[in-house]
Amino acid sequence: MSETLVEQVRGGLVEAIHRGDLAVVDSHGTLRASVGDPRGKIAYWRSAAKPFQALPLIHSGAAERWNLSSADLALIAGSHNGEPIHVDQASQILAKIGCRPTDLVCGTHPPLSPAAAEELRRMGAEPSVLHHNCSGNHIGMLALAEHLGVPLSGYPARDHPVQTAILEAVSGFVGVAESEIVVGVDGCGVPCFGTSVYHLAYAFARFMEPEQLSPAWAGAAHDIRTAMAGDPYLVAGQGRLDTDLMQSADVIAKGGASGVQCVGLPGGVGIAIKIEDGSMGPPPAPGAVATIAVLQQLAFLDEEQVCALSAHARPVVRTSAGQVVGEVRPAFELVLHSTP
């Protein structure tokens, strides 16, 4: 069974627990630290796969052909809030590649940003496909399809050339044969990938230090890392762990639905966390609490950084009137296998 990672406390009582599994792995495949059974726990990557789904854009030459900027790549690799800055960036990329919003099949939902959603309601406007948190990811897939000269229609299908190129990239970075990767359908309709939590951490480690891969794939990883680190607000947005963590520390952070959170550290160390019950919040999110705790236990964050990330590290529980009545706290100690 997965182990307790996070507790929610109200008064003197632990009223909720969130179990999970996590792994800290280096680019040579060494499991440096863990909680639970990360080798045995199989989980979908969900949106944590987006940096890898963006890799074929670089590797194929599509990003160069369409003159995609670092900011464009950050949005494509992210799960954005649907704030005006995100919608504007998505529109700009569409214009570059000569596509329209109607070419996107990710669907629509209100912006993840409460403020942006409220502004739409105030204006009496409906959310568009560009407000979808995955719109940048899908626009990247359209850009790749245009570059490859294959039909735009059906681009989410598992056997579409865009998706076969993405699966090749995922397989190469995770070090697992394509046939051994579990493939499902994500919430936005494109394939999602399932591996052990250990292999997810390993993929992020190799993403950070792809020395064992070809120069072309290593260069693609460098470009995506640079884009995400350079424009972390485009990756997620206000109040989101991925943005706040990348603004506070030298890391690459990407979460996914159903309680998935990954972090890449300089030098080739990957962290992957899967919350068993899939809880993601709204804040406080147990995956965020566990993530900050892992980084603290690895002595990666200093006190100033932890303070800046306090809303994620140990968030308080409040009543509707704002009274503090509890907290959400980490409840684990890393089992160290090899000193990071």
Image: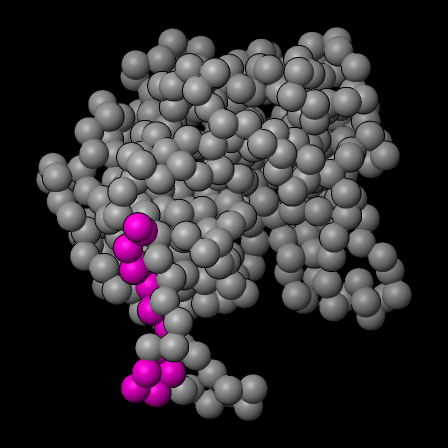
- How many labels, in total? 0
The residue at the point 26 percent across, 48 percent down is 36
Q: Is residue 219 above or below residue 317?
A: above
Q: Horizontally, is 30 left or right of 243 in the view?
A: left
Q: Would residue 309 be visible to someone looking at this image?
A: no
Residue at 38% across, 9% down: 214
* Residue at image coords 69%, 35%: 189
Image quarter hosting the C terminus: top left
Read off the magenta span: 1-13
Indicate how the structure is coloured in the image.
one colour
Q: Is residue 127 above or below residue 70?
A: below
Q: Position of residue 37 (x, y in %)?
A: 27, 42
* Front position in the image: 160 or 3: 3
Relative image position of residue 24 (x, y in whole percent): 25, 40
Which sits in the foreground, 187 or 298? 187
Tell me which residue sits at (51%, 50%) in the image. 258
Residue situated in front as seen by the camera: 120 or 95:
120
| Secondary structure mostly seen in the magenta stretch | strand
Is 146 left, or right, of 4 in this rendering? right
312 and 163: which one is in front?
163
> Could one spot residue 29 in this view of the protein?
yes
- Residue 122 among magenta residues: no
Q: Position of residue 76 (x, y in %)?
A: 61, 34
The image shows residue 174, relative to residue 201, as above or below, that is: above
Q: Is residue 319 above or below residue 35?
A: below
Relative to 279, is 95 on the left or the right?
Answer: right
Considering every residue shown, the one lying at the far right of the view is: 124
